[in-house]
Structures are given as C-alpha cells and as structure tokens.
Image (cartoon, helix red, strand yellow):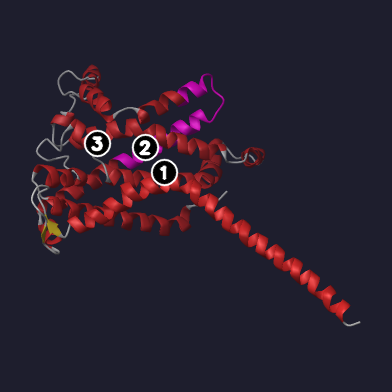
C-alpha cells in the first residue's frame, strides 16, 4: 500500500528531469547552430585580424628587412621608435587630422540627417547621392580633390578669386596640406555618418516630439532637449568609429600628398608603411603599429568610460 504514493511522487520528478534534459539538449543545439552561423565571419576575423596582430607582435621583437632571416632584437625596436623625433611628429600630424576631421563629419552628418529626416521631394534620391562618395575609390576621390584644390587652376581658388580672396596653396603648401586632406576625407565620409544618425533619428518615437510641440517647445528646444539626448547612442557610435578610422588614416594621405610637402602630412600609418617597405625595417614598423594600437585602445577605453555621463538610452 505504501508503494503507490512513492510512485506518485517519483513520476513528477522524472517528468521534471526529462524536461531539464530536453532543455539542456536544446541549449546545446542552439549553441552549435550559433557557432555554425558565426564561423563564416569568425574564421576571416581570426585569419586576417588576430593572426596578423600576433605576427606583428613577434616581428616587433626582431630585426628584419623582409628578405634576410629575422634576428632577435628584444625591445630595441620600441626604444628606437620612441627615441625617434619622427614618431612624435607623425603622431602629432595624425592628431591634427583627427581634430579637423571629426567635428566636420559629425556636424555636417548631423545637419544632413536632420534635413533628410523630413518629408522632402526626392528625399530617397538625396540620401543615395550623399552616400555615394562613401563607396567611391579613394584614388578617384584624390584625383578630383587634387584638381579642385589645385593652387593655380583649381576650382576652389578660382571661386575665392571672384570674391577678391587670394586662395592658399592647399596640398602644395605645408601649412594647408593637412586641411586639404581633412576636407576631402570629410566630404567622402559624411554620408556614412549621415546614414547612422538618420537611422538613430528614425528610432526616436514621434510621440515624444509631438508632446513637446503641445507643451510649446520650439525647434531649437526640441533639438537640444529631446533629439540630441535620444540620439546620443548613435552619436557615440559615430564618434568611436570616426576616431578609430581617423587614427588609422592612410589612403587619402598616400593618394593626395604621399606625406608631403616636406613631411607636413606624414601620419603614423604611412610611417609604418615607409619603415617596413621603403627602409626595410619591418621590426620598427611593427613596433610603431603596436604603439598606435595602444593609443587607439586607450582613446576607446576613455570613450567607453565617458559614455555613462552623456549617452542616454531611449
């Protein structure tokens, strides 16, 4: 007579155990499916990002001219790079580029995004037109901008001459060469910033702005008190990505000025290129690239720490 109650108690326990076992199997299956979907992107990421980083770290500890066998150098390459006055100069040129580039793409990208977030005739066409430079080759962009900013026959200086302004030497003048690269870069990348911020604007609930209008808030008040705070996650993403890309600037410099005139636009990545492929100092080039990585990482960590103070989730 006592077996029936025990069996009755054991049945729910067995059912619970079966459910837990089935959940465990389902979780494992889900993990395998997730891994299967991640592999197509994870394998190239490991092969073309992490493996080269480890390889660069190993090369930085050796002397190597890309031809002869590597010779162990320890930290000598880092000491040489840190003691070279050129290193400070190229980092300063890179910072100059970032300080000019980031405000331009952010302000103009935000302005275009705000304009194209409204109901306008041909709005979709305008979005495509503004995004077109993003997918354009830097070689083509450099050729166009070198012509536009040509000191003698360039369109920009001719327009300035109509207003009685003597245009500068632009990419041929050490004082204005970096400004030329900043202008070309901002023109090319502002469409990317516009798309990101436009997506952020469209995620802001319309009811919030409608309530602000009913409360009597004007356009500027809505922009500063509603739009920008709710857009801050998208702005934060743009700032982080733009800073990372800015510190790695190379294509536009190489295509427009090749670091000239007189080294006025020589940036860190081009110095890495020159050390490695022009001067046969691959160890020093790898050491400089790792220093750049450390700087970018430090700047990104500071931004991640500071986002708690000005980034607001919707």
Judged from the image, the secondary structure of the residue bearing numbered disc 3 is: helix
- Which residue occupies 16% across, 45% down? 271
Q: What stretch is highlighted in magenta?
A: 101-127
- Which residue occupies 52% across, 50% down? 34
- Which residue occupies 73% across, 67% down? 16
Mark nearer the viewer, 3 or 1? 3
Distance from Cα at disc 2 to Cα at disc 1:
9 Å
Residue picked out by circle 3: 251
Dominant secondary structure (helix, strand or loop) of the stretch shown in magenta: helix
- Which residue occupies 54% across, 22% down? 120
The reply to whether dot 2 and dot 3 touch (C-beta < 8 Å) is no
Q: Residue 238: give x, y in percent of width and height.
A: 41, 43
Residue picked out by circle 2: 105
Distance from Cα at disc 2 to Cα at disc 3:
17 Å
Q: Residues within 10 Å of mark 1 (few under 14, many from 20)?
A: many
Q: Residues within 10 Å of mark 3 (few under 14, many from 20)?
A: some
Residue picked out by circle 1: 238
Please state if 44 lies on the left or on the right of 276 as rendered: right
The reply to whether dot 2 and dot 1 touch (C-beta < 8 Å) is yes
């Amino acid at each position: 007579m006592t077996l029936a109650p025990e069996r009755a108690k054991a049945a729910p326990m067995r059912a619970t155990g079966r459910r837990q076992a089935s959940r465990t199997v389902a979780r494992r299956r889900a993990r395998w499916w997730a891994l299967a979907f991640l592999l197509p992107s994870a394998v190239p990421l490991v092969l073309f990002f992490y493996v080269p980083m480890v390889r660069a770290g190993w090369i930085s500890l050796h002397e190597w001219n890309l031809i002869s066998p590597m010779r162990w150098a320890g930290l000598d390459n880092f000491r040489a790079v840190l003691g070279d006055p050129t290193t400070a100069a190229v980092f300063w040129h890179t910072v100059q580029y970032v300080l000019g580039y980031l405000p331009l793409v952010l302000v103009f990208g935000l302005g275009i995004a705000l304009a194209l977030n409204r109901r306008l005739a041909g709005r979709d066409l305008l979005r495509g037109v503004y995004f077109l430079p993003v997918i354009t080759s830097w070689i083509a962009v450099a050729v166009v901008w070198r012509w536009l900013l040509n000191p003698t026959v360039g369109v920009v200086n001719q327009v300035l001459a109509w207003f009685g302004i003597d245009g500068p030497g632009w990419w041929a003048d050490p004082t204005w060469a970096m400004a030329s690269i900043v202008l070309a870069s901002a023109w090319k990348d502002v469409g990317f910033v516009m798309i990101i911020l436009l997506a952020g604007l469209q995620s802001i609930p319309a009811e919030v702005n409608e309530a602000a209008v009913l409360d009597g808030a004007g356009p500027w008040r809505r922009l500063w008190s509603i739009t920008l705070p709710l857009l801050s996650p998208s702005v934060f993403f743009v700032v982080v990505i733009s800073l990372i890309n800015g510190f790695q600037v190379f294509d536009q410099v190489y295509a427009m000025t090749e670091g000239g005139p007189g080294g006025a636009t020589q940036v860190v990545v081009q110095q890495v290129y020159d050390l490695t492929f022009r001067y046969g100092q691959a160890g020093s080039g790898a050491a400089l690239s790792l220093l750049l990585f450390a700087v970018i990482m430090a700047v990104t960590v500071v931004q991640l720490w500071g986002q708690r103070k000005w980034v607001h989730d919707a």
